[in-house]
C-alpha cells in the first residue's frame, strides 16, 4: 500500500493525499509544498516504482531497503539522508524486529517498511488530527515517527520484565530443571536487544549532534531526546540481564542447598547404620568366645547392642544440631 500526504510548505497544513505516480513527480518539483510518501506492505516491484521511478534514489540505498538487515545505519546522499532503524515487538519470549527505512529530503520524507508499523499508523493519525504540529518540515515529521517507534520498546521491555519476575517467583516456589534453559533463552533475547539498540544509539547520535544539515538546529534537542530514550532502553536491557544473572545464581544456590540436604540425609543414615554394621560384621567372624554361636540368646544381644548404639548416635546428632 502506497500512501502520500501533501502539506503546505509554510504552515504544514494537509492539502492533499494519495496522489498518483505522475502527480508525485510533478509535486516533487514544487518548492511550495512538502510531502510524505509511505511505501508499506507492497511488492518489491511496486516499491521500486516509487523509490527508483519517482525519486530516483541511489541503487545501493534501494537495495538496502529491499534486503532486510538487523543493523541500523544512516548515510548521506546528494539531496537526502538515508536512515535504517528497527521497531521491536516481544512475542512468545522472543524479540522480533521490523525494519523501517527513511529517506529524508529538504521537502519530502519517504518511508518504506514490509510489515504494518504502529509508529507509522500513529503518525498518520496525528497528521489527520493536527498536521501543522508534526508536518512543518521533514525533519520534524521524522522525529514524530521515531518517537512513536521508540515508545514501542517500552511495552516489549515491560513484558519481558514480567516474564523474568514470573520466572523468579516460580523458581522460588517450585524449582524445576528447565529453569536453566529458560534463563539461557531470555539472556539470549536480552543480548539480541542490546545488539539492536547499540547501533541505533550511534545512528541517532549522529543526527542529534547535527552532522547532517537537513536536520535543522532547533530540532537537535528533539533528536537528543530520542537519544536519551535509547539510553534508557539500553539501561533497562542491562537491568534485565542483571536480573537474569541473579535468577541464575539463586537457582544454582537452591540446587546446591538441595544437594547438601541430600548429602546430609545420606550421612545421617550411614552414621545410624554404623552400629548394625559393626555388630553384624563381628558376628560374621568365625569366633567361639562368649557370646559365641552356641549362645542361646545371641540375637537378643545383637539387637540390644545395635539398637542402643543407634539410639545413642541419633540422640547425639540431634543434640549437636547436625540432624
Image (spheres, grey):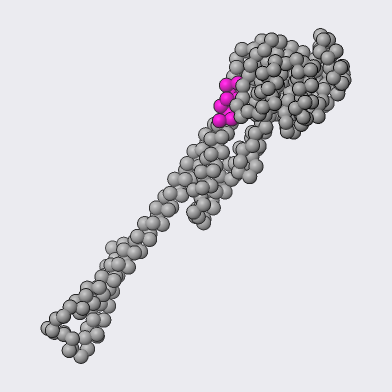
The C terminus appears in which quarter of the rendering? bottom left
**As rendered, which of 151 and 38 lies closer to the eye?**
38
Residue 264: horizontal and vertical position, in percent? 34, 61
Residue 247 located left or right of residue 146: left
Q: Does the magenta stretch include residue 202?
A: yes
Residue 283 located left or right of residue 146: left
For the stretch drawn in magenta, the main secondary structure is helix
The part of the chain drawn in magenta is 195-203
Residue 205: horizontal and vertical position, in percent? 59, 19
Q: Which quarter of the figure has residue 298?
A: bottom left
Which residue occupies the extreme bottom position in the image? 296
Residue 16 located left or right of residue 91: right
Residue 122: horizontal and vertical position, in percent? 76, 30
Residue at 79% across / 17% down in the picture? Answer: 53
Q: Is residue 102 magenta?
A: no
Q: Which quarter of the figure has residue 289?
A: bottom left
Residue 10: horizontal and vertical position, in percent? 81, 11
Residue at 71% across / 18% down in the picture? Answer: 103
Rendered view: 92 above or below 112: below
Residue at 62% across / 13% down in the picture? Answer: 210
Rendered view: 260 above or below 1: below
Task: Tally the numbered discs.
Answer: 0
The N terminus appears in which quarter of the rendering? top right
Residue at 87% across / 21% down in the picture? Answer: 20
Q: Which quarter of the figure has residue 147?
A: top right
Which residue occupies the extreme left position in the image? 289
Amino acid at each position: 500500500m502506497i500512501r502520500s500526504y501533501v502539506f503546505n510548505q509554510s504552515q504544514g497544513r494537509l492539502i492533499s493525499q494519495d496522489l498518483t505516480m505522475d502527480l508525485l513527480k510533478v509535486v516533487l518539483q514544487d518548492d511550495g509544498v512538502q510531502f510524505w510518501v509511505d511505501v508499506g506492505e507492497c511488492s518489491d516491484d511496486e516499491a521500486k516504482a516509487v523509490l527508483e521511478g519517482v525519486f530516483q534514489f541511489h541503487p545501493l540505498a534501494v537495495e538496502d531497503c529491499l534486503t532486510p538487515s538487523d543493523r541500523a545505519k544512516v548515510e548521506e546522499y546528494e539531496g537526502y539522508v538515508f536512515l535504517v532503524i528497527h521497531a521491536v515487538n516481544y512475542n512468545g519470549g522472543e524479540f522480533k524486529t521490523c525494519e523501517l527505512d527513511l529517506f529524508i529530503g529538504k521537502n519530502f520524507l519517504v518511508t518504506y517498511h514490509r510489515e504494518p508499523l504502529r509508529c507509522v499508523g500513529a503518525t498518520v493519525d496525528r497528521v489527520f488530527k493536527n498536521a501543522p504540529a508534526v508536518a512543518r518540515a521533514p525533519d520534524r515529521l521524522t522525529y514524530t515517527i521515531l518517537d512513536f517507534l521508540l515508545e514501542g520498546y517500552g511495552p516489549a521491555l515491560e513484558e519481558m520484565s514480567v516474564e523474568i519476575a514470573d520466572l523468579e517467583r516460580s523458581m522460588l516456589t517450585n524449582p524445576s530443571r528447565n529453569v536453566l534453559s529458560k534463563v539461557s533463552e531470555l539472556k539470549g533475547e536480552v543480548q539480541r536487544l542490546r545488539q539492536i539498540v547499540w547501533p541505533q544509539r550511534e545512528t541517532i547520535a549522529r543526527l542529534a549532534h547535527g552532522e547532517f544539515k537537513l536536520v535543522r538546529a532547533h530540532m537537535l534537542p528533539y533528536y537528543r531526546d530520542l537519544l536519551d530514550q535509547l539510553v534508557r532502553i539500553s539501561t533497562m536491557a542491562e537491568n534485565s540481564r542483571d536480573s537474569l544473572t541473579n535468577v541464575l545464581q539463586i537457582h544454582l544456590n537452591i540446587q546446591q542447598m538441595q544437594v547438601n540436604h541430600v548429602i546430609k540425609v545420606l550421612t545421617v543414615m550411614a552414621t545410624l547404620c554404623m552400629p548394625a554394621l559393626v555388630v553384624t560384621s563381628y558376628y560374621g567372624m568365625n569366633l567361639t568366645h562368649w557370646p559365641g554361636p552356641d549362645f542361646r540368646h545371641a540375637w537378643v544381644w545383637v539387637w540390644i547392642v545395635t539398637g542402643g548404639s543407634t539410639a545413642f548416635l541419633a540422640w547425639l546428632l540431634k543434640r549437636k544440631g547436625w540432624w
